[in-house]
Amino acid sequence: MKNIIVGTAGHVDHGKTCLIKALTGIDCDRLKEEKKRGITIENGFADMVVGDYNVSIIDVPGHEKFIKNMLMGIGGIDMVLLVIGLDEGVMPQTVEHFRILEMLDIRRGIIVYTKRDLVTDEEWIEMVKEDAHELVKGTFLEGAPEIEVSSYDGYNIEELRKLILETIDDSVLKNDSSSMFRLPVDRVFTIDGFGTVITGTLMEGSIRQGDDVMVYPGGKVCKVRNVQVHNENVTEALAGQRTALNLQGLKKDDLERGRVLAKPDSLEPSKFLDVRLELFRDSDRPVLNGSRVHFHSGSSEAVAKVILLDRDSLERGDSCYCQLKLEEEVAVRRNDRFIIRFFSPLITLGGGRILETSAVKHKRFDEKTLEALSIKDQGTIKEVLEITVKEQSRNFPDNLSLALKINHSPEGVKALLEELLKESRIFRVKKDGFIHLAYLERAEELACGILTEYHKANSMSGGLPKAEFLSRLLKELRTEDRKAGESILDLMKERKVLKENSGLISLYDFKIKESPEMVKLRERILKKYREAGFEMPTLDMILSSEKDKKNAGHIVESLAEEGDLVRLDFQYYMARDDYDKAMKALMDHIGNNGRITLAEFRDILGTSRKYAMAFLDHTDRSKITEKKDDYRVLLKR
């Protein structure tokens, strides 16, 4: 069976609750106050099976005082029954409800004229319908199916069921990927012997008995003990179903209406949202920069300050990009729809679509910001993904975090990431992270700045030691992620921006340019090592004998890079010819005798114990030999 959610909308006392009872047999008015006053106060819920569909129906309040409750129930619906009483026709809340439906991007619906049994004047009925057609002109309900019914005598109720089935479109069915599970909470209560129970409309994904869920905002994690759909125990609930969850490890006081349940770490509660805001075309007041409003999305509500990004005033029927600065956190996703109401008096003004959650504060009238928001608003999903990678590169986002950020399936994001990789628009870092080309180019710019400055001050050095270079680069990039830094370094080497030689990092085209004085210094140092043979001087001895100690040290490094010297440790270097002779003598002796002692090697070289020890320590560190007791053997490879 497929699942779909149908909502009602319309003026108070136009028969929404009676209509649902006639369709399903369920009375949605469950509160004593509702029975006493004869009006719906809280959202009510019913269900029925129509064809291959489980249809959940939401009954919303029609009275202007309960618009807040109406907004809480209407957000997750797939299609609507716009209810208009034939005895009164289009009324103020009919218009307000319909404007809200438009703003929430509902795409399917039926116009239902109720109380047919009370009206016999055909001319009046035609006038009511003309007003209704004028209301919906140019909207998703223009040309929509319409039907006259009577909940009192059952007139056309069965035909309405058939019409609902004919109007359902599978294109509006919700995503049931388990990773995207999200359920806004609209009721919280306790049942003796069971504990805390919540209900809500499952907007996205699926949930199973035994799953862990997190409360947003708040961050408390609990386990799903039991799942019910339409008052029946099930092992799994799917998107598009009215769902009740019995939660283990959570008290009633830990939850309240307006909270959201989702998979752990799958939502980012935020007080800053980037949105496209649009005012109703018949709104009676503008929104000024800095206006305070009531923000409604799903079952969440918060007071917000409107920051207009490209103007000072938003007029009726217009739209623009803006930021909403909320007074408390809400848990929403990109593309969620929202409604705003004026702070006081409570007048519904308009709404829009969320473009970015956990947004950063923007400068007003900034062209780059407005361009980025335009892509997030009107671009393809691939373009939205690319700009999200660009903005998130500093965090080295992975596939799943990007999927959650742009509210798209992980499978779809993975395929798009592969396309962007092939186009060299993005690059992979670490094992599963990504950065944008712009971020890499910025990193290259910083790296070139670091190395240019170093080469200028150290013309005789082959480059910065890798560890020091990475430390400086990561500081410039304002991150401590060394693995990401190493990946970026590898990318820069592949792109021939820089090179690495013997653990030193330099600009790709850098070459040591020696003055005649430096050539003489190089020859003098190399001569000292060659004359020393196996009894090589320490680096400190070499430096102390030269006036230009800084460049003398760089030359020793350069000679080691070029292979004229071999570095044994931080103090001892040996001329290449002498190193090769010592290594051959070592290998020959062990090859003939199976092992060698320090004393034997000392005698073979004809030098002191100190120099023989320095050489053998080097071969141990290099995994050529292995020390056992007082002798060494070749390390097996």
Image (tube, helix red, strand yellow):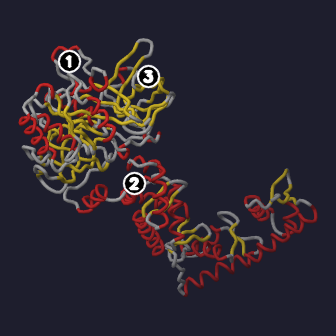
Which of pointers 2 and 3 lies earlier in the amino acid sequence? 3
Where is mark 1, residue-wise? Answer: 34
Label 2 packing within 10 angstroms: few (<14), some (14-19), many (20+): some
Nearer-the-camera pick, 117 or 279: 117
* Image quadrant containing the N terminus: top left
Q: Which secondary structure lies at badge 2?
A: helix
- Identify which amino acid the numbered label 2 is placed on: Gln
What x and y, as percent, mark residue 382?
39, 59
Please, is residue 173 above or below residue 365 in the view? above
Rounded to the nearest whole Å, what is the CA distance between mark 1 and mark 3?
Answer: 26 Å
Whether residue 382 can be seen here: yes
What x and y, as percent, mark residue 424?
46, 67
Rounded to the nearest whole Å, what is the CA distance between mark 2 and mark 1?
Answer: 49 Å
**Disc assigned to residue 232:** 3
Which of pointers 1 and 3 lies earlier in the amino acid sequence? 1
* Image quadrant containing the C terminus: bottom right
What x and y, as percent, mark residue 570?
65, 63
- Picture quarter containing residue 172? top left
Instruction: Give left or right: position of 445 versus 110.
Output: right
Q: Which secondary structure lies at badge 1?
A: helix
Which of pointers 2 and 3 indicates the residue nearer the eye? 3
Whether residue 329 can be seen here: no
Where is mark 2, residue-wise? Answer: 392
Rounded to the nearest whole Å, what is the CA distance between mark 2 and mark 3?
Answer: 43 Å
- Identify which amino acid the numbered label 1 is placed on: Glu
Nearer-the-camera pick, 405 or 87: 87
**CB under 8 Å between discs 2 and 3:** no
Which of pointers 2 and 1 lies earlier in the amino acid sequence? 1
What x and y, as percent, mark residue 432?
52, 53
Label 1 packing within 10 angstroms: few (<14), some (14-19), many (20+): some
Q: Which residue: 70% across, 76% down?
A: 529
